[in-house]
Amino acid sequence: MEKFSAKNADYIITVLKTNEEKAKKMNKQVFLLPYGLFAGSKETKINLDKLKTKKSNLKVIYSGTQEEWKRVDKIINAAKEVDCDLFLIGKINPKFD
């Protein structure tokens, strides 16, 4: 799943230097953000506009399991303070419904 996602992504944002190097080898535009946030948006081939709550909102996608140790709650809380729509993709944690 990870390789498929990376191959079909327009842009890759990662917190790991090793993943940055892998993305560069795949000739992908990559942004290394060591445990930080990127303010700005890029056009994608994925159309989530019909799910947005406001037309001007940035779309943020988290892909992965939502286990407590991954601290997805921090992403959710940060998204509440920004004009964005957060999409969680992966094994659902009922705590975050």
Image (cartoon, helix red, strand yellow):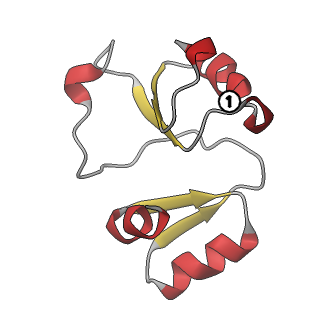
**Number of disc labels:** 1
Q: Is residue 43 left or right of residue 73?
A: left
> Residue 80: x percent and y percent?
60, 13
Q: Is residue 7 above or below residue 75?
A: below
In this rendering, position of residue 37 left or right of residue 6 = right
Q: Work out which residue is located at the far bottom of the displayed protein and give it.
A: 25
Q: Residue at x 31, y 49 (%)?
A: 43
Q: Residue 19 appears in which quarter of the rendering?
A: bottom right
Image quadrant occupied by the N terminus: bottom left
| Image location (x, y in percent) of residue 76 | 62, 21
Q: Which residue is mark 1?
A: 72
Of residues 89 and 41, which is closer to you in this image?
Answer: 89
Would you say 75 lies left or right of 13 here?
right
Regarding residue 6, the answer to whether it shows in the image is: yes
Q: Compared to 69, does 78 lie above or below?
A: above
Q: Residues within 10 Å of mark 1 (few under 14, many from 20)?
A: some
Residue 74, position as x, y percentages in the image: 73, 25
Quadrant hosting residue 58: top left
Dot 1 amino acid type: Val
Q: Quadrant of residue 3?
A: bottom left
Q: Secondary structure at mark 1?
A: helix
Residue 88, percent across and down? Answer: 48, 31
Residue at 77% x, 55% y is 34
Q: Nearer the viewer, residue 57 or 67?
A: 67
Q: Is residue 80 visible?
A: no
Q: Residue at x 37, y 67 (%)?
A: 4
Q: Nearer the viewer, residue 17 or 39?
A: 17
Position of 74 compared to 63: left or right? right
